[in-house]
Amino acid sequence: MYKPLLLIILGPTAVGKTDFAIERALECGSPVVSCDSRQIYKELKIGTAPPSSEQLARVRHYFIFSHSVNDYFTAGRYEIEALALLDELFKTHSTVVMAGGSGLYIDALCNGLDDFPPADQNLRRRLTLKAEKEGVESLAALLREIDPLSYETIEISNRQRVIRAVEVTLQTGRKFSDWKSHAVKERPFQIRKIFLSRDRELLYERINKRVDLMMEQGLLDEALSLMRFRDRPALNTVGYKELFDYIDGKTSLAEAVELIKRNSRRYAKKQLTYWRRDNALETVCI
């Protein structure tokens, strides 16, 4: 039975996914469906490195600036909305191109989410309070002790995910990573994943240059304009939280910029670790 194709372009931050995906989309007459957990937010115009206006003009994009930071948006919600969109797009396209670096969102779309236990609200409140008082690093250290695999694959700057991983592990006595059954749900389309790779030093150089460019484009002013949203999960993101610390007087601007670069490189490393487990990837060196 014929099935349409979902072509997913993935890889670490700053590797060049956007340009690569646009070229593939132009080749097959497809739009680009973004699978990035931060580029969906319309208020974050610079710090998430979304496609430029020129890139958006070349190919129709979905899930770029489509939601507000006030929305409670999760991987589960993305799974539902993206599947509904693909159902419509496949009516007129034999191939649809997707681009993104958010591993959990891509897994949710391709495989479906595992059935985790309901949240223990009292435990969650205690862990949230601990993160607020001591910083998410304190929970990350605990996660490293009780579930090293989750520590290696979760974006530590994503406070919600760290809290959830610690919460599930403490609540059930079973590692958060062990709850992932990896049982694949059937999808009405074929999936092909292309993983973009670059020399590690070159990738880090691209990350550093991109941070400098974002600062030139006005990332500090954007962070200032978003201060009222700083407690939203969407703003607990590399690039913004470091500048919020600068605005609070905790660091100098130069220190904040260096921290953005360092944390972006660390995020890229975690993305590489996350995808190393997927044997279905076709690696393309660019």
Image (cartoon, grey):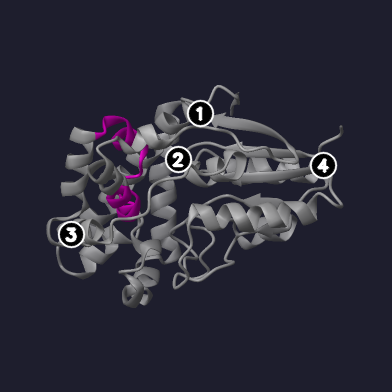
Q: Is residue 253 magenta?
A: no
First reached walking from the N terminus: tag 1 or tag 3: 3
Q: Amino acid at mark 4?
A: Cys
Distance between the Cα atoms at labels 1 and 2?
10 Å
Q: Residues within 10 Å of mark 1 (few under 14, many from 20)?
A: some
Foreground mark, 4 or 3? Answer: 3
Q: Position of residue 54 (x, y in %)?
A: 66, 59
Q: Position of residue 119 (x, y in %)?
A: 33, 55
Residue marked by disc 1: 198
**Numbered range of the magenta stretch:** 147-164
Total labels: the figure holds 4
Residue marked by disc 4: 28
Q: Residues within 10 Å of mark 2 (few under 14, many from 20)?
A: some
Q: Amino acid at mark 2?
A: Arg
- Is the C-beta separation of discs 1 and 2 under 8 Å? yes
Q: Residues within 10 Å of mark 3 (few under 14, many from 20)?
A: few
Q: Which SS class for mark 3?
A: helix
Q: Is residue 264 above or below residue 192?
A: below
Is 96 in front, or is 90?
A: 90
Q: Residue at x 36, y 34 (%)?
A: 177
Q: Which SS class for mark 4?
A: helix
Foreground mark, 3 or 2? Answer: 3
Distance between the Cα atoms at labels 3 and 2?
39 Å
